[in-house]
């Protein structure tokens, strides 16, 4: 009656007749699992920054699916498994990874942290050409698999790389956002808070322009409870200020270099900053953040430059920009930021 | 040190009426000294002559200094320590974090990096120092520091090296936070929990080994993957020794109260056609796998420690499989620590769950106890 059958197959068929699996006995399926995530985030790069972004996003329950992409397959898989093993403690049900960008398909946001790392003493601008090459290998695949996504660029030098990513991706400027001065402003607020003995969330202050050495602190806007510090100390931020508040801005610039010298890299603060931006975008919060966006046409800038200005972030990315009145000195510094970047950008080959 | 005595009194929850303000003032000093001022931030100005922005903006209302109720200290700022830190901070569990490590540069770098994220997550005060006075008045101290196993090193030797490290750590911790709970994460966790308990002379409720909390989380995750259900809805316990000889309690594995053993009586045995036993084996293997792939594990252990921290700080009285002294249970005579389900609250381990084990499961626990004792009895504590 039976032709020659593989004994294993026969055994299995016998088992099935005898006893279904625990799963089959326990669970009755009513409908196919809907595998389409609503809020998928992809992180490109599983270095310290990428993983800090990942853990922050997971702990804030921002995504229902997280995909990790990297070129180093062992590290990638190890990181993914380590996160998965924490599943009991958060609510992101799907964590995947792969070298191939197909794993990033249908992402709402793609966070680009991949790139060469700033070495001790190296400026962000030194990294540029190395990172341009990397972006060329990353961006087309991202856009192919998630044509509607917003891209959040974190790799340094972030302003130039955001420009590069924008150019390569062909996406509208509203959907290519550089993490920019979101972190500088946070550091600024933290240091102001330390000086005043007030928590950083109650200290308001904005740093715009280049995320880096030529960033522009807007002293006129620095306030606590609406009280502008400049009204209490008109010399605030200048060299002649007896309290030397301008040192706070200098410290912000030095922060990254200092931390890199002490622990080798920075990760937690930038990870938290990215979490902050992702939250605003995914939940359409329309909060204002100093992020890197295209500023051609503003403040007399004629080139296609990305610099940080206060932007309204929502589901579509950068939906509005806040038109800050810069005094002549601030505007000059802002334009100087633009010049510094353009000098490097114009020589780029890509 | 004479000021540690008033410090101890200040660490109690005080109402302002009962507080000895002199003590509180003295309690101030180590905290303030421990704050590492950032370069250039604290320039001296002649305050008497000139009003600062701060003095013009802010009027002091009270001279009472805050007493921390939810202070956590983490010893060791490696990947595990920092994963614990970020998880605890993002869950908003504490009002002060102290970090201690021998490597001052790394310590300071990590602290600054966390502090800079302050405005994104309502960061509490973070202090750090090589010196343990920064841990004073901690509610909970998490120990992640420890010697790493060297190539070809015996387990006994590794443990003996860790005993030397723990001697210094524990005496310092106890001096500054005599009423704290200790969570031991460093491996081999069961032995080191015993060592910490012996060295601290703490009552057994206040020494908790992270034990099988992580193994159980992994177990539940893998069960969930097999059934297509979130790990939170999959219940299962791994007990005993954290590591290769852990014991999966198959009788307790259930979904919605339905024991899987009722559906498959061979579950966990070699005869099981579905080979559910592999799920437990995978739990053991994945730790090594992750270490091979990324060099260490961090995220899962950090999250699991934050979970324990939450139960303790919020006095939740949830049950967790953590490592505690098991002498007198399951026919075990040795003074060893093994994981069993414990109720965790503000006093640490307040109750044990008297879980019924099969004779085979009990035998495995007894075997683990003997193995641990063989090593422990040689230790010079």
Image (spheres, coloured by chain):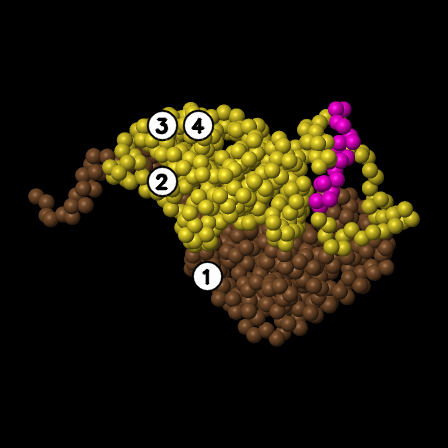
- Position of residue A4 measured from the top left corner of the image (x, y, whole percent): 11, 48
* Mark 3 and mark 4 on one chain: yes
Q: Relative to residue B349, is residue A244 drawn left or right?
A: right
Name the residue that disc number 1 marks: A71
Q: For mark 1, give the secondary structure.
A: loop
Relative to residue A164, is residue B210 depicted above or below?
A: above
Q: How far apart are marks 3 and 4 (CA)?
A: 16 Å
Q: Mark 4 lies on which chain?
A: B
* Mark 4 and mark 1 on one chain: no
- Can you tell which quarter of the image residue A31 is in? top left
Name the residue that disc number 2 marks: B280
* Label 2 with label 4: CB-CB less than 8 Å: no
Q: Between label 1 and label 3, give the one nearer the viewer.
A: 3
Q: Which of B212 and B374 is in front in this view?
A: B374
- Position of residue A255 measured from the top left corner of the image (x, y, whole percent): 68, 57
Q: Residue at image x 42%, y 35%? A: B373
Q: How far apart are marks 4 and 1 (CA)?
A: 50 Å
């Amino acid at each position: 009656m039976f032709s020659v059958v593989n004994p294993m197959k026969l055994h299995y068929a016998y088992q099935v007749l005898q006893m279904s699996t625990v799963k089959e006995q326990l669970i009755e399926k009513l409908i196919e699992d809907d595998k389409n995530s609503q809020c998928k985030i992809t992180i490109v790069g599983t270095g310290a920054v990428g993983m800090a972004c990942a853990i922050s996003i997971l702990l804030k329950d921002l995504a229902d699916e997280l995909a990790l992409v990297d070129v180093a397959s062992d590290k990638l898989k190890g990181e993914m498994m380590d996160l998965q093993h924490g599943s009991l403690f958060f609510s992101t049900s799907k964590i995947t990874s792969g070298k191939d960008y197909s794993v990033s398909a249908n992402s709402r946001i793609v966070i680009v942290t991949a790139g060469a790392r700033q070495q001790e003493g190296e400026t962000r601008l030194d990294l540029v050409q190395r990172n341009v090459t990397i972006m060329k290998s990353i961006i087309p695949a991202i856009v192919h698999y998630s044509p509607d996504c917003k891209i959040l660029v974190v790799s340094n030098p972030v302003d130039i790389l955001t420009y590069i990513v924008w150019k390569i991706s062909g996406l509208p400027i509203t959907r290519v956002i550089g993490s920019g001065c979101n972190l500088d402003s946070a550091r600024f607020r933290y240091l102001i808070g330390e000086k005043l003995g007030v928590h950083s969330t109650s200290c308001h202050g904005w740093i715009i322009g280049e995320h880096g050495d030529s960033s522009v602190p807007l002293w006129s806007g620095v306030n606590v409870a609406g009280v502008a510090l400049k009204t209490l100390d008109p010399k605030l931020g200048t060299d002649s200020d007896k309290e030397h508040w301008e040192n706070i801005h200098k410290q912000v610039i030095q922060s990254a270099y200092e931390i890199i010298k002490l622990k080798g890299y920075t990760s937690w603060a930038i990870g938290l900053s990215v979490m902050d931006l992702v939250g605003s975008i995914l939940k359409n919060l329309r909060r204002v953040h100093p992020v890197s966006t295209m500023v051609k046409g503003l403040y007399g800038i004629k080139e296609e430059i990305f610099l940080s200005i206060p932007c309204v972030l929502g589901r579509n990315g950068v939906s509005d920009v806040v038109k800050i009145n810069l005094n002549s000195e601030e505007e000059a510094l802002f334009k100087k930021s633009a010049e510094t970047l353009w000098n490097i950008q114009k020589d780029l080959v890509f | 040190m004479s000021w540690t005595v008033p410090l101890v009194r200040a660490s109690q929850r005080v109402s302002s009426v009962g507080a000895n303000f002199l003590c509180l003032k003295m309690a101030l000093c180590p905290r303030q000294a421990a704050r590492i001022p950032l370069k250039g931030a604290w320039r001296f100005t002649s305050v008497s002559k000139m009003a600062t922005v701060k003095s013009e903006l802010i009027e002091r209302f009270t001279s009472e200094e805050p007493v921390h109720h939810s202070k956590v200290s983490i010893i060791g700022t490696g990947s595990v320590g920092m994963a614990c830190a970020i998880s605890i901070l993002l869950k908003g569990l504490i009002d002060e974090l102290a970090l201690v490590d021998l490597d001052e540069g790394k310590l300071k770098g990590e602290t600054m990096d966390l502090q800079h994220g302050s405005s994104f997550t309502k960061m509490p005060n973070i202090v750090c120092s090589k010196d343990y006075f920064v841990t004073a008045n901690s509610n909970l101290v998490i120990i992640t520091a420890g010697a790493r196993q060297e190539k070809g090193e015996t387990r006994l030797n590794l443990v003996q090296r860790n005993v030397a490290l723990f001697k210094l750590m524990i005496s310092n911790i106890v001096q500054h936070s005599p009423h704290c709970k200790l969570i031991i994460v460093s491996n081999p966790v069961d032995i080191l929990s015993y060592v910490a308990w012996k060295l601290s002379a703490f009552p057994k409720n206040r020494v908790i080994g992270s034990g099988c909390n992580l193994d159980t989380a992994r177990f539940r995750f893998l069960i969930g993957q097999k059934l297509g259900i979130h790990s939170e809805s999959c219940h299962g316990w791994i007990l005993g020794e954290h590591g290769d000889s852990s014991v999966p309690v198959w009788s307790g594995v259930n979904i919605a109260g339905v024991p899987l053993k009722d559906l498959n009586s061979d579950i966990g045995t070699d005869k099981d056609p579905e080979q559910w036993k592999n799920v437990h084996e995978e739990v053991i293997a994945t730790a090594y796998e992750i270490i091979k792939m990324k060099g260490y594990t961090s995220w899962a252990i950090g999250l699991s420690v934050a979970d324990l921290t939450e139960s303790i700080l919020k006095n939740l009285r949830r049950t967790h499989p953590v490592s505690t002294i098991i002498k007198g249970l399951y026919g075990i005579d040795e003074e060893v620590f093994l994981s069993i389900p414990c109720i965790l609250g503000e006093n640490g381990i307040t109750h044990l769950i008297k879980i019924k084990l099969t004779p085979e499961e009990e035998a495995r626990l007894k075997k683990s106890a003997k193995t641990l004792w063989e090593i422990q009895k040689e230790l010079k504590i």
